[in-house]
Image (cartoon, helix red, strand yellow):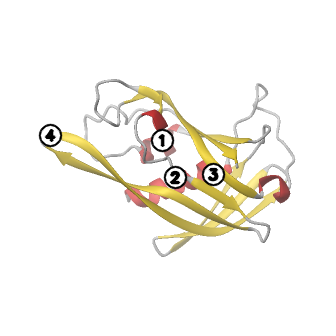
Amino acid sequence: MNFMKSFLSLLMCSVLLISCSDDDDQVQTLSENDLEGNWTLIEMNASSGVDLNNDGTSNTDITNETDCFDNMTVNFQSDSNFMLDYPGLDFDDVNGETVLNCEDKNTSGSYSLNGGTLSITTEIENNVETDDFQVNLSGNQLSFTVTNAQAASYFDFDISDNENADLQSIEFVFEEN
C-alpha cells in the first residue's frame, strides 16, 4: 500500500467530514455556501493514545505529538474547487527508533455537496480519485471521524511492532478562519 496515497486520502476525508452532535443518525442538509472559506485543523483525536514524538508519553490529540499538522488547512472556494495544505509525512528508522519527518505539501481538486453528502475529486499520484462523505456542521467547527480501516492505513509505518497500528478511529476538527 502506498503510504502517501493513503495519507492524502485520509487528509481529504478529514477536510470533508464533520462529526455529528449527540445524534449520530441525523443527517444535516448543507449547501456549498456552508463550506466556503478557509478551515484550519485544530485537533486530531485518535481513539487511543499515540506517541509519535517518542517521548514515552501517549496522547489522543495527535496535534500535541507533532507540529507537522500546524499548517494543515483547506479552502473551499465558491467555484466548487478546493485547495488543501497538508503535511507530507516520512518515517525514518534512526538507531532502532521511528523518527517522524514532515514537510508542507498541497493539492487541489473539486467538490460538490448534495444534502449532507460531500463528494471530492482530486488527482493522487496520477490517479483521479472521487470520495463521498456524510457531513455535518456545528457552528464554526468542521470535524469528522475516520474509520479504523482508514486509521490503520494512515498509521501503517511498515513496522510490525508499531503501537499505533491498532487505532480504531481518528477525528479531525477544523475551525473556520
How far is mark 1 from mark 2, CA to CA? 21 Å
Mark 4 or 2: the one toward you: 2
What element does badge 1 sit on?
Answer: helix
Mark 1 or 3: the one toward you: 3
Give the mark nearest the N terminus, 3 or 4: 3
Label 4 sits on residue: 96
- Is 126 in front, or is 172? 172
Instruction: Tell me the amino acid under the disc marked 3.
Output: Val
Give the mark nearest the N terminus, 1 or 2: 2
For the residues bearing labels 3 and 4, Cβ distance under 8 angstroms = no
What element does badge 4 sit on?
Answer: loop
- Is 47 in front, or is 59? 59
Residue 71's disc number:
2
Residue 97's disc number:
none
For the residues bearing labels 1 and 2, Cβ distance under 8 angstroms = no
Label 3 sits on residue: 15
Instruction: Tell me the amino acid under the disc marked 1.
Output: Ala
Residue 151's disc number:
1
Give the mark nearest the N terminus, 3 or 2: 3
What element does badge 3 sit on?
Answer: helix
Residue at (40% x, 40% y) in the render: 66
Quadrant of the rendering where the N terminus is positioned: bottom left
Instruction: Tell me the amino acid under the disc marked 4.
Output: Gly
